[in-house]
Image: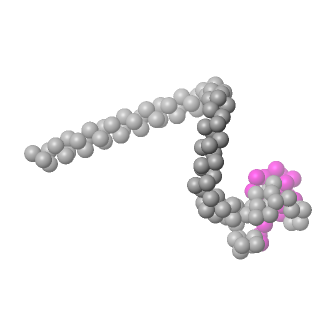
Amino acid sequence: MSYGNPIKSAARRRALELQLVRYDPHVACINGHMSERYTKHDTCIQCLTEWRQKHKNELGDLSNQWQKRNRAHMREYHRQWREKNAERWQELMEKSAAQRRKNKQKKNANLINNTNKEN
């Protein structure tokens, strides 16, 4: 992964002009991946994906620690998001309720089936 590289490729220059998030450099990265790159930092997406996968646990731990230290900030952030995205929030709540009902029905069906097998 390389950060802050000078703009060498025409493909990246064009992607920056078009304000694209990703672009295809048509050349392999230093690790041999033929994947797209992020325009802003010229980072190979495959390299970044592999790095995140390798460091998933420690990244999650750091995030959890930060959130615990900043509970008030997180609470306010989520409150503002819910206000700003009221329709989306409602959709998510309805979807969640439907999923809970479905799981409850499935659990009840399993209990009935298990009871019938015992008899």
Q: Is 72 or 85 nearer to us in this picture?
A: 72
Horizontal side of 82 relative to 16 (left or right) equals: left
Q: Position of residue 50 (x, y in %)?
A: 64, 63
Q: Is residue 16 magenta?
A: yes
Quadrant of the drawing holding the N terminus = bottom right
Horizontal side of 62 relative to 22 (left or right) equals: left
Q: Position of residue 99 (x, y in %)?
A: 41, 38
Q: Position of residue 15 (x, y in %)?
A: 82, 56
Outermost residue to the left = 119
Q: Is 96 or 118 nearer to us in this picture?
A: 118
Relative to 67, residue 56 above or below: below
Q: Is residue 15 magenta?
A: yes
Horizontal side of 62 relative to 93 (left or right) equals: right
Q: Is 63 or 76 nearer to us in this picture?
A: 63
**Residue segment shown in magenta:** 11-27
Quadrant of the drawing holding the C terminus = top left
Chosen colour scheme = one colour
**Residue at 64% in and 36% down:** 69
Q: Is residue 46 visible?
A: yes
Horizontal side of 107 relative to 81 (left or right) equals: left
Q: Position of residue 74 (x, y in %)?
A: 64, 33
**Residue at 76% in and 57% down:** 38
